[in-house]
Image: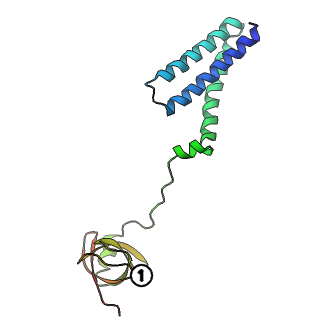
Amino acid sequence: MPEILWILFAVLLLVACAALLVLEIFIPSLGLISLFAMACLAGGIWIFFQYTALGWIGVVIAIVLIPAVWIIVYKLLPKTKIGRILELKKVEQANGGIPDLDQLESLLGKTGVVAKPLRPVGICDFGGNKVVCVSETGFIEKETTVKVIHVEGNKITVRKTEAV
């Protein structure tokens, strides 16, 4: 084979090395794919030293080519169909979180509306503040008026009231 074909074959082995290292991420092979990747790397560099006067050019090509393939995969994979399947979904942040204890205690005796049914736990709206509440008696439907009868720690107990 002419020298140029050997050099192209060596570059092809280096590309195969990079591709196999990327594949190792997705296929659990207990390092077998990595072993083949290292064999491709060694074979490519060996060919460069055998058939060219400047074998170190092959080492430089490997040092540049393998990370370049990783960067390309890193940039392009999320845009592909399989990349979107593999990518974790973004989690929406909860707005507000748990109110301070002082804020919860200030709700004692106030009335609000059930935002999500209490079974016996659900969410009640007290003037724009949505808080997790516990029903005193059991199930309370949505849009029912409730009154805070007890606050202990971050546990708010409510009772169904008659609409005014």
Give the residue type that dot 1 points to: Gly
Q: Secondary structure at mark 1?
A: loop
Which residue is farthest bottom? 164
Query: Which residue is label 1 attached to?
Result: 127
Q: Position of residue 138 (x, y in %)?
A: 25, 75
Between 64 and 157, the one lying in front of the other is 157
Position of residue 130 measured from the top left corner of the image (x, y, whole percent) = 40, 74
- Image quadrant of residue 57? top right
Q: Nearer the viewer, residue 29 or 128?
A: 29
Q: Residue at x 61, y 36 (%)?
A: 73
Residue 121 in percent (x, y) is at 30, 70
- Coordinates of residue 63 in the picture (x, y in percent): 62, 23
Tell me if residue 37 comes above or below residue 81 in the rendering. above
Left/right of residue 45 with respect to residue 99 in the rendered view? right
Q: Residue at x 36, y 67 (%)?
A: 98
Q: Residue at x 72, y 16 (%)?
A: 8
